[in-house]
Amino acid sequence: MDRRAFLGSLGSVAVAVGLAGCGQGSADSGDYDVGMTTRKFTPAQVEVPPGTTVRWRNTSTHAHTVTAYEDSIPDGAAFWATGEFDSQAAAEEGWLGGNEGAIYEGETYEHTFETVGTHSYFCIPHEASGMVGAVVVSEDATAGGADTPTDA
Ligand SMILES: [Cu+2]
């Protein structure tokens, strides 16, 4: 894992909340936490405190999905995926049936994570190429990254 990208990603969460749209043409074109290249999520893993909204952005020209591994999310967490499917099987069927759940160049997807634990996910068309990732939800994580004081 690229340690610097990982820490930078954590910092961007706080920036997105506090300075939405700053330096960007519009709020919608602004910050994201996880980008997508041709065949990978970058960074592949982010660590956030409970209640954090993680934003993915397709920074490539290829269509991707962000699809939870139904059996690799914490007990009690609802299934999550682009296309708002109820299950991994439904998401995979939707993709095969006409690229349902795809997010295209420049589009974003957001999900708010409440349940502590590791939420593993993948891109349906590119899983075989290693396009997988994880959101680690931890009480110990700080949205502001390493420089945030522990006591306010
Ligand atoms: Cu993909």
Image: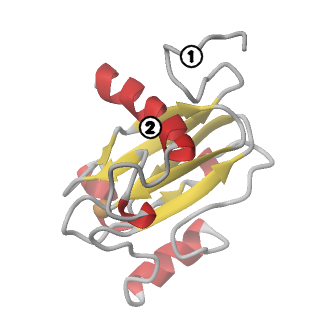
Report the front residue among 47 and 89. 47
> Callout 1 environment at 10 Å: few (<14), some (14 to 19), or many (20+)?
few
Nearest to N terminus: mark 2 or mark 1: 2
Residue 115 visible in the picture: yes
Residue 1 visible in the picture: no
The percent position of residue 21, horizontal first and vertical second, equals 43, 55
**77 to the left or right of 36:** right
The percent position of residue 55, horizontal first and vertical second, equals 49, 53
Q: Which residue is mark 2?
A: 12
The percent position of residue 94, horizontal first and vertical second, equals 48, 83
Occupied quadrant, residue 7: top left
**Residue at left 53%, top 76%?**
83
The percent position of residue 91, horizontal first and vertical second, equals 53, 74
Mark 2 sits near ligand 1, with its Cβ under 8 Å away: no
CA–CA distance in space, label 2 to label 1: 13 Å
Inspect the image, locate mark 2, and give the three-letter code of the amino acid beneath it.
Answer: Ser
Q: Which residue is mark 1?
A: 148
Occupied quadrant, residue 110: bottom right
Q: Quarter for ligand 1?
A: bottom left
Report the front residue among 4 and 71. 4
**73 to the left or right of 135:** right
In the displayed structure, would residue 141 be above or below residue 73?
above
**Residue at left 49%, top 44%?**
19
Inspect the image, locate mark 1, and give the three-letter code of the amino acid beneath it.
Answer: Thr
How many marks are shown on the rendered structure?
A: 2
Q: Secondary structure at mark 2?
A: helix
Most extreme residue toward the right is: 76
**Residue at left 40%, top 50%?**
31
Report the front residue among 81 and 145. 145
What scheme was used to colour the molecule? secondary structure
Position of the N terminus, as image quadrant, is top left
In the displayed structure, would residue 117 be above or below residue 148?
below
